[in-house]
Amino acid sequence: PRPEAATAPRIPATRLALHHFDVTYGPVLRERWAAARAALLCEQKYGALLNSFCSADHVTQELELLGATDFVSEASERARRGAQEGDGGCREGSGEGRTAAREETTRAEKSPLLRASASSNIRCYTFPRCDITRFRPARPDVLGLLDYYLLDAASLLPVLALNVQPDDFVLDLCAAPGGKTLALLQTGVCGYLAANDISVSRTKRLHQILHSYVPKEMRETVSVTSYDGRDWGQLEGGTFHKVLVDVPCTTDRHSVMEEDNNIFHKRRTKERQMLPMLQLQLLMAGILATKPGGEVVYSTCSLSPLQNEFVIERAVEIAETQFNISIHIEDLSHFRTLFQDTFSFFSDCRLGELVLPHLTANFGPMYFCKLCRR
Ligand SMILES: C[S@@+](CC[C@H](N)C(=O)[O-])C[C@H]1O[C@@H](n2cnc3c(N)ncnc32)[C@H](O)[C@@H]1O
Protein backbone atom coordinates (compact mmCIF):
# COMPACT_ATOMS: atom_id res chain seq x y z
CA PRO A 1 0.00 0.00 0.00
CA ARG A 2 1.14 3.51 -0.78
CA PRO A 3 2.03 5.72 2.20
CA GLU A 4 -0.81 7.89 3.47
CA ALA A 5 0.97 11.19 2.83
CA ALA A 6 1.48 10.42 -0.86
CA THR A 7 -2.16 9.58 -1.52
CA ALA A 8 -3.89 12.23 0.63
CA PRO A 9 -5.28 14.86 -1.75
CA ARG A 10 -3.82 18.32 -1.29
CA ILE A 11 -6.52 20.70 -0.15
CA PRO A 12 -6.28 23.94 -2.12
CA ALA A 13 -5.26 26.96 -0.04
CA THR A 14 -8.37 28.81 -1.27
CA ARG A 15 -10.55 26.08 0.30
CA LEU A 16 -8.60 26.28 3.55
CA ALA A 17 -9.06 30.05 3.55
CA LEU A 18 -12.79 29.84 2.98
CA HIS A 19 -13.20 27.25 5.72
CA HIS A 20 -11.16 29.39 8.12
CA PHE A 21 -13.31 32.44 7.30
CA ASP A 22 -16.56 30.47 7.75
CA VAL A 23 -15.44 29.47 11.22
CA THR A 24 -14.05 32.84 12.33
CA TYR A 25 -16.20 35.44 10.52
CA GLY A 26 -19.57 33.62 10.65
CA PRO A 27 -20.07 34.21 14.39
CA VAL A 28 -18.89 37.85 14.17
CA LEU A 29 -20.71 39.01 11.04
CA ARG A 30 -23.69 36.68 11.62
CA GLU A 31 -26.38 37.10 8.92
CA ARG A 32 -24.15 39.46 6.93
CA TRP A 33 -21.43 36.83 6.45
CA ALA A 34 -23.40 34.87 3.80
CA ALA A 35 -23.67 37.99 1.61
CA ALA A 36 -20.03 38.99 2.15
CA ARG A 37 -18.90 35.41 1.42
CA ALA A 38 -20.81 35.30 -1.87
CA ALA A 39 -19.35 38.66 -2.87
CA LEU A 40 -15.77 37.59 -2.01
CA LEU A 41 -16.21 34.70 -4.44
CA CYS A 42 -17.40 36.94 -7.28
CA GLU A 43 -15.73 39.53 -9.46
CA GLN A 44 -14.70 42.62 -7.53
CA LYS A 45 -15.53 46.17 -8.54
CA TYR A 46 -12.98 48.84 -9.28
CA GLY A 47 -12.78 52.57 -9.00
CA ALA A 48 -10.89 54.85 -11.43
CA LEU A 49 -8.65 57.21 -9.45
CA LEU A 50 -8.23 60.19 -11.79
CA ASN A 51 -4.68 61.35 -12.36
CA SER A 52 -4.70 65.10 -11.82
CA PHE A 53 -1.20 65.31 -13.36
CA CYS A 54 -2.43 63.91 -16.69
CA SER A 55 -3.36 66.40 -19.38
CA ALA A 56 -5.74 64.10 -21.31
CA ASP A 57 -9.03 65.89 -22.00
CA HIS A 58 -12.49 64.46 -21.83
CA VAL A 59 -11.75 61.62 -19.38
CA THR A 60 -14.38 62.78 -16.89
CA GLN A 61 -16.88 63.38 -19.71
CA GLU A 62 -16.22 59.90 -21.08
CA LEU A 63 -16.71 58.31 -17.63
CA GLU A 64 -19.84 60.33 -16.91
CA LEU A 65 -21.35 59.33 -20.27
CA LEU A 66 -20.89 55.71 -19.22
CA GLY A 67 -22.80 56.44 -16.00
CA ALA A 68 -19.86 56.56 -13.58
CA THR A 69 -19.71 59.28 -10.89
CA ASP A 70 -17.00 60.67 -8.65
CA PHE A 71 -17.93 59.30 -5.21
CA VAL A 72 -15.42 61.52 -3.39
CA SER A 73 -16.83 64.85 -4.56
CA GLU A 74 -20.37 63.50 -4.11
CA ALA A 75 -19.56 62.80 -0.47
CA SER A 76 -17.91 66.24 0.00
CA GLU A 77 -21.04 67.82 -1.43
CA ARG A 78 -23.21 65.78 0.91
CA ALA A 79 -21.06 66.83 3.90
CA ARG A 80 -21.26 70.49 2.82
CA ARG A 81 -25.04 70.35 2.45
CA GLY A 82 -25.33 68.62 5.83
CA ALA A 83 -23.33 71.44 7.41
CA GLN A 84 -25.46 74.12 5.73
CA GLU A 85 -28.72 72.49 6.77
CA GLY A 86 -27.35 72.33 10.29
CA ASP A 87 -26.63 76.08 10.08
CA GLY A 88 -30.17 76.85 8.91
CA GLY A 89 -31.57 74.79 11.76
CA CYS A 90 -29.50 76.81 14.21
CA ARG A 91 -30.90 80.10 13.04
CA GLU A 92 -34.50 79.07 12.68
CA GLY A 93 -34.89 76.44 15.35
CA SER A 94 -35.40 76.90 19.02
CA GLY A 95 -34.80 74.98 22.23
CA GLU A 96 -33.90 71.34 21.80
CA GLY A 97 -34.10 71.48 17.99
CA ARG A 98 -31.55 74.25 17.91
CA THR A 99 -29.14 72.35 20.13
CA ALA A 100 -29.47 69.21 17.99
CA ALA A 101 -28.92 71.19 14.79
CA ARG A 102 -25.85 72.88 16.27
CA GLU A 103 -24.45 69.52 17.31
CA GLU A 104 -25.04 68.22 13.78
CA THR A 105 -23.22 71.26 12.32
CA THR A 106 -20.27 70.85 14.65
CA ARG A 107 -20.11 67.18 13.72
CA ALA A 108 -20.13 68.00 10.01
CA GLU A 109 -17.49 70.71 10.51
CA LYS A 110 -15.36 68.20 12.31
CA SER A 111 -15.79 65.79 9.43
CA PRO A 112 -12.27 65.17 8.12
CA LEU A 113 -13.66 64.98 4.61
CA LEU A 114 -15.32 68.35 4.87
CA ARG A 115 -12.21 69.94 6.31
CA ALA A 116 -10.13 68.20 3.67
CA SER A 117 -12.40 69.04 0.78
CA ALA A 118 -10.77 72.43 0.24
CA SER A 119 -7.34 70.92 -0.22
CA SER A 120 -8.18 67.44 -1.45
CA ASN A 121 -8.11 66.94 -5.17
CA ILE A 122 -8.77 63.23 -5.02
CA ARG A 123 -11.35 62.21 -7.59
CA CYS A 124 -12.42 58.62 -8.03
CA TYR A 125 -15.12 57.36 -10.38
CA THR A 126 -17.24 54.28 -9.70
CA PHE A 127 -20.30 52.79 -11.36
CA PRO A 128 -23.51 52.85 -9.32
CA ARG A 129 -24.65 49.99 -7.08
CA CYS A 130 -25.56 46.84 -9.07
CA ASP A 131 -23.84 48.22 -12.20
CA ILE A 132 -20.91 45.93 -12.97
CA THR A 133 -19.56 47.79 -16.02
CA ARG A 134 -15.77 47.54 -16.24
CA PHE A 135 -13.43 50.45 -16.89
CA ARG A 136 -11.28 50.43 -20.01
CA PRO A 137 -7.52 50.17 -19.35
CA ALA A 138 -5.78 53.48 -18.56
CA ARG A 139 -4.42 55.54 -21.50
CA PRO A 140 -1.38 57.80 -21.69
CA ASP A 141 -1.45 61.53 -22.48
CA VAL A 142 1.08 63.23 -24.81
CA LEU A 143 3.75 63.14 -22.11
CA GLY A 144 3.08 59.47 -21.41
CA LEU A 145 1.27 59.97 -18.07
CA LEU A 146 -1.71 57.64 -17.62
CA ASP A 147 -5.19 59.10 -17.17
CA TYR A 148 -6.40 56.97 -14.27
CA TYR A 149 -5.38 54.23 -11.87
CA LEU A 150 -7.75 51.31 -11.29
CA LEU A 151 -8.03 50.20 -7.67
CA ASP A 152 -10.50 48.91 -5.10
CA ALA A 153 -12.35 52.17 -4.45
CA ALA A 154 -12.62 51.28 -0.73
CA SER A 155 -8.85 51.60 -0.44
CA LEU A 156 -9.24 55.37 -0.79
CA LEU A 157 -11.13 55.55 2.51
CA PRO A 158 -8.00 55.20 4.69
CA VAL A 159 -6.35 57.95 2.61
CA LEU A 160 -9.38 60.24 3.01
CA ALA A 161 -9.45 59.47 6.75
CA LEU A 162 -5.81 60.59 6.99
CA ASN A 163 -7.02 64.04 5.93
CA VAL A 164 -3.70 65.41 4.62
CA GLN A 165 -3.38 69.17 5.12
CA PRO A 166 -1.12 71.59 3.22
CA ASP A 167 2.58 71.03 3.95
CA ASP A 168 2.03 67.92 6.07
CA PHE A 169 4.98 65.53 6.34
CA VAL A 170 3.46 62.18 5.41
CA LEU A 171 4.80 58.65 5.85
CA ASP A 172 3.35 55.66 3.98
CA LEU A 173 5.00 52.86 5.96
CA CYS A 174 3.93 49.83 3.86
CA ALA A 175 3.52 51.55 0.52
CA ALA A 176 3.99 49.05 -2.32
CA PRO A 177 2.68 48.59 -4.96
CA GLY A 178 1.60 52.20 -4.40
CA GLY A 179 -2.14 52.75 -4.93
CA LYS A 180 -2.48 54.71 -1.71
CA THR A 181 0.81 56.55 -2.26
CA LEU A 182 -0.55 57.74 -5.59
CA ALA A 183 -3.80 58.83 -3.90
CA LEU A 184 -1.79 60.73 -1.26
CA LEU A 185 0.05 62.53 -4.09
CA GLN A 186 -3.24 63.36 -5.81
CA THR A 187 -4.17 65.58 -2.83
CA GLY A 188 -1.40 67.82 -4.21
CA VAL A 189 -0.67 69.19 -0.74
CA CYS A 190 1.86 66.84 0.91
CA GLY A 191 4.86 68.88 2.09
CA TYR A 192 7.01 65.78 2.01
CA LEU A 193 6.10 62.14 1.33
CA ALA A 194 8.12 59.14 2.46
CA ALA A 195 6.98 55.87 0.87
CA ASN A 196 8.51 52.75 2.37
CA ASP A 197 8.10 49.02 1.82
CA ILE A 198 10.30 46.17 3.00
CA SER A 199 10.00 44.35 -0.32
CA VAL A 200 12.55 45.48 -2.90
CA SER A 201 10.62 43.88 -5.78
CA ARG A 202 7.39 45.56 -4.71
CA THR A 203 9.13 48.94 -4.34
CA LYS A 204 10.20 48.53 -7.98
CA ARG A 205 6.50 48.35 -8.83
CA LEU A 206 5.96 51.49 -6.75
CA HIS A 207 8.68 53.28 -8.77
CA GLN A 208 6.95 52.16 -11.99
CA ILE A 209 3.62 53.55 -10.82
CA LEU A 210 5.22 56.87 -9.88
CA HIS A 211 6.83 56.96 -13.33
CA SER A 212 3.55 56.25 -15.11
CA TYR A 213 1.45 58.76 -13.17
CA VAL A 214 3.55 61.52 -11.64
CA PRO A 215 5.63 64.25 -13.38
CA LYS A 216 9.37 64.21 -12.69
CA GLU A 217 9.45 67.38 -10.52
CA MET A 218 6.81 65.92 -8.24
CA ARG A 219 8.40 62.44 -8.16
CA GLU A 220 11.55 63.97 -6.82
CA THR A 221 9.71 65.11 -3.69
CA VAL A 222 8.86 61.50 -2.82
CA SER A 223 11.44 59.50 -0.91
CA VAL A 224 11.13 55.76 -1.64
CA THR A 225 12.89 53.37 0.77
CA SER A 226 12.95 49.62 1.48
CA TYR A 227 13.40 49.42 5.25
CA ASP A 228 11.73 47.06 7.66
CA GLY A 229 8.94 49.37 8.80
CA ARG A 230 9.19 47.98 12.33
CA ASP A 231 12.46 49.89 12.75
CA TRP A 232 11.10 53.23 11.55
CA GLY A 233 10.45 54.66 15.02
CA GLN A 234 14.15 54.33 15.80
CA LEU A 235 15.20 55.72 12.42
CA GLU A 236 13.06 58.86 12.19
CA GLY A 237 10.89 59.00 15.29
CA GLY A 238 8.45 61.82 15.98
CA THR A 239 8.80 63.63 12.64
CA PHE A 240 5.56 63.10 10.69
CA HIS A 241 2.19 64.86 10.84
CA LYS A 242 0.39 61.94 9.18
CA VAL A 243 1.30 58.26 8.94
CA LEU A 244 -0.47 55.57 6.93
CA VAL A 245 0.08 51.99 8.18
CA ASP A 246 -1.51 49.77 5.52
CA VAL A 247 -0.27 46.45 6.84
CA PRO A 248 0.26 43.02 5.29
CA CYS A 249 -2.77 40.88 6.19
CA THR A 250 -4.66 37.74 5.10
CA THR A 251 -5.88 39.69 2.00
CA ASP A 252 -9.20 37.85 2.29
CA ARG A 253 -10.38 38.37 -1.28
CA HIS A 254 -7.10 37.12 -2.75
CA SER A 255 -7.00 34.19 -0.29
CA VAL A 256 -10.35 32.73 -1.38
CA MET A 257 -9.70 33.22 -5.11
CA GLU A 258 -6.02 32.64 -5.95
CA GLU A 259 -3.70 29.73 -5.22
CA ASP A 260 -0.61 31.75 -6.15
CA ASN A 261 1.08 33.49 -3.24
CA ASN A 262 -1.74 32.37 -0.91
CA ILE A 263 -1.05 32.88 2.81
CA PHE A 264 -3.26 29.88 3.63
CA HIS A 265 -0.76 27.46 2.02
CA LYS A 266 0.18 24.93 4.70
CA ARG A 267 3.85 25.95 4.50
CA ARG A 268 2.92 29.54 5.42
CA THR A 269 0.90 28.68 8.55
CA LYS A 270 3.48 30.13 10.93
CA GLU A 271 3.75 33.34 8.91
CA ARG A 272 -0.05 33.68 8.90
CA GLN A 273 -0.31 33.12 12.62
CA MET A 274 2.36 35.75 13.23
CA LEU A 275 0.51 38.42 11.18
CA PRO A 276 -1.23 40.15 14.15
CA MET A 277 2.17 40.48 15.88
CA LEU A 278 3.79 41.96 12.74
CA GLN A 279 0.80 44.30 12.32
CA LEU A 280 1.09 45.45 15.93
CA GLN A 281 4.82 46.12 15.54
CA LEU A 282 4.22 48.12 12.36
CA LEU A 283 1.43 50.13 13.98
CA MET A 284 3.65 50.87 16.99
CA ALA A 285 6.42 52.06 14.63
CA GLY A 286 3.83 54.26 12.89
CA ILE A 287 2.72 55.78 16.20
CA LEU A 288 6.34 56.45 17.20
CA ALA A 289 7.07 58.05 13.80
CA THR A 290 4.28 60.58 14.43
CA LYS A 291 4.80 63.99 16.06
CA PRO A 292 2.74 64.71 19.19
CA GLY A 293 -0.59 65.91 17.78
CA GLY A 294 -0.04 63.85 14.65
CA GLU A 295 -2.34 61.18 13.27
CA VAL A 296 -2.04 57.57 12.16
CA VAL A 297 -4.45 55.60 10.00
CA TYR A 298 -4.20 51.81 10.30
CA SER A 299 -5.76 49.70 7.55
CA THR A 300 -6.12 46.12 6.36
CA CYS A 301 -8.05 44.36 3.60
CA SER A 302 -9.24 41.66 5.98
CA LEU A 303 -12.46 41.10 7.95
CA SER A 304 -10.54 39.54 10.84
CA PRO A 305 -11.12 41.22 14.23
CA LEU A 306 -7.78 39.74 15.33
CA GLN A 307 -6.02 41.75 12.62
CA ASN A 308 -8.24 44.81 13.05
CA GLU A 309 -9.69 45.95 16.38
CA PHE A 310 -7.46 43.71 18.51
CA VAL A 311 -4.31 45.20 16.99
CA ILE A 312 -5.62 48.71 17.68
CA GLU A 313 -6.46 47.89 21.29
CA ARG A 314 -3.06 46.34 21.97
CA ALA A 315 -1.25 49.27 20.33
CA VAL A 316 -3.15 51.85 22.42
CA GLU A 317 -2.32 49.89 25.56
CA ILE A 318 1.39 49.51 24.71
CA ALA A 319 1.69 53.19 23.71
CA GLU A 320 0.30 54.20 27.12
CA THR A 321 2.13 51.71 29.32
CA GLN A 322 5.52 51.42 27.59
CA PHE A 323 5.92 54.81 25.90
CA ASN A 324 3.70 57.08 27.98
CA ILE A 325 1.94 58.14 24.77
CA SER A 326 -1.75 58.82 25.06
CA ILE A 327 -3.86 57.91 22.00
CA HIS A 328 -7.31 59.07 21.07
CA ILE A 329 -9.31 56.98 18.57
CA GLU A 330 -11.18 59.30 16.20
CA ASP A 331 -14.83 58.56 15.55
CA LEU A 332 -15.18 57.91 11.80
CA SER A 333 -18.83 56.83 11.89
CA HIS A 334 -19.81 59.79 9.65
CA PHE A 335 -17.94 57.96 6.83
CA ARG A 336 -20.81 55.46 6.87
CA THR A 337 -23.31 58.24 6.16
CA LEU A 338 -21.14 60.04 3.62
CA PHE A 339 -20.27 56.94 1.59
CA GLN A 340 -23.40 54.81 2.04
CA ASP A 341 -24.35 55.03 -1.65
CA THR A 342 -21.03 53.57 -2.74
CA PHE A 343 -20.03 51.03 -0.05
CA SER A 344 -21.66 48.55 2.32
CA PHE A 345 -20.42 49.13 5.85
CA PHE A 346 -20.50 46.89 8.91
CA SER A 347 -21.84 49.08 11.66
CA ASP A 348 -20.84 46.96 14.67
CA CYS A 349 -17.06 47.41 14.82
CA ARG A 350 -15.94 48.31 18.32
CA LEU A 351 -13.25 50.56 16.87
CA GLY A 352 -12.74 51.84 13.33
CA GLU A 353 -14.85 51.22 10.22
CA LEU A 354 -15.19 48.17 7.98
CA VAL A 355 -16.34 47.97 4.36
CA LEU A 356 -18.04 44.62 3.72
CA PRO A 357 -18.04 43.16 0.23
CA HIS A 358 -21.59 42.88 -1.11
CA LEU A 359 -22.83 41.77 -4.54
CA THR A 360 -24.47 45.16 -5.11
CA ALA A 361 -21.24 47.02 -4.20
CA ASN A 362 -18.42 44.54 -4.49
CA PHE A 363 -15.60 46.56 -2.90
CA GLY A 364 -13.43 45.71 0.10
CA PRO A 365 -12.92 44.21 2.56
CA MET A 366 -11.32 47.34 3.95
CA TYR A 367 -10.84 48.08 7.62
CA PHE A 368 -9.53 51.49 8.74
CA CYS A 369 -9.08 53.16 12.09
CA LYS A 370 -7.63 56.56 12.97
CA LEU A 371 -5.38 57.10 16.00
CA CYS A 372 -4.46 60.58 17.19
CA ARG A 373 -1.29 60.99 19.23
CA ARG A 374 -1.81 63.44 22.06
C1 LIG B 1 -1.36 45.69 1.95
S1 LIG B 1 0.19 45.82 1.21
C2 LIG B 1 0.35 47.55 0.96
C3 LIG B 1 -0.46 48.08 -0.18
C4 LIG B 1 -0.17 49.53 -0.51
N1 LIG B 1 -0.33 50.39 0.65
C5 LIG B 1 -1.06 50.05 -1.63
O1 LIG B 1 -2.06 50.72 -1.38
O2 LIG B 1 -0.74 49.76 -2.79
C6 LIG B 1 1.28 45.52 2.54
C7 LIG B 1 2.74 45.76 2.23
O3 LIG B 1 3.48 45.64 3.43
C8 LIG B 1 4.79 45.27 3.08
N2 LIG B 1 5.48 44.79 4.30
C9 LIG B 1 5.43 43.59 4.88
N3 LIG B 1 6.20 43.58 5.98
C10 LIG B 1 6.74 44.82 6.10
C11 LIG B 1 7.64 45.42 7.02
N4 LIG B 1 8.12 44.74 8.04
N5 LIG B 1 7.98 46.71 6.81
C12 LIG B 1 7.49 47.40 5.75
N6 LIG B 1 6.66 46.88 4.85
C13 LIG B 1 6.29 45.60 5.02
C14 LIG B 1 4.58 44.22 2.01
O4 LIG B 1 5.73 44.10 1.20
C15 LIG B 1 3.36 44.78 1.26
O5 LIG B 1 3.78 45.47 0.11
Image (cartoon, grey):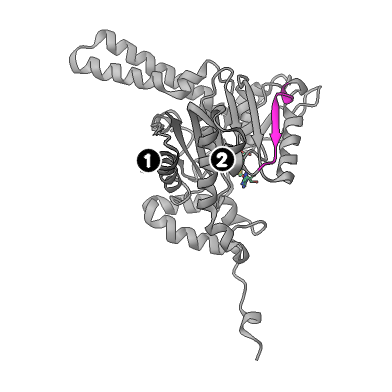
Closer to the camera in the image, 104 or 170: 170
Q: Element under label 1?
A: loop
Q: Looking at the image, is mark 2 or mark 1 earlier in the sequence?
A: 2
Provide residue 225's location: percent of width, then percent of height.
Answer: 70, 37
Q: Element under label 2?
A: strand
Q: Write the residue at 47% across / 27% down.
A: 292
Please say if 79 is above or below 238: above
Question: Which label is found at residue 246?
Answer: 2
Q: Write the residue at 52% across / 15% down.
A: 118
User: In the image, what residue type sits under mark 2?
Assistant: Asp
Q: Magenta residues?
A: 218-227
The quadrant of the picture showing ligand 1 is: top right
Q: Quadrant of residue 22?
A: bottom left
Quarter placement of the C terminus: top left
Provide residue 246's location: percent of width, then percent of height.
Answer: 56, 40
Provide residue 52's location: percent of width, then percent of height.
Answer: 67, 21
Residue 123 can be seen in this image: no
Q: Is residue 350 magenta?
A: no
Question: Which label is found at residue 347?
Answer: 1
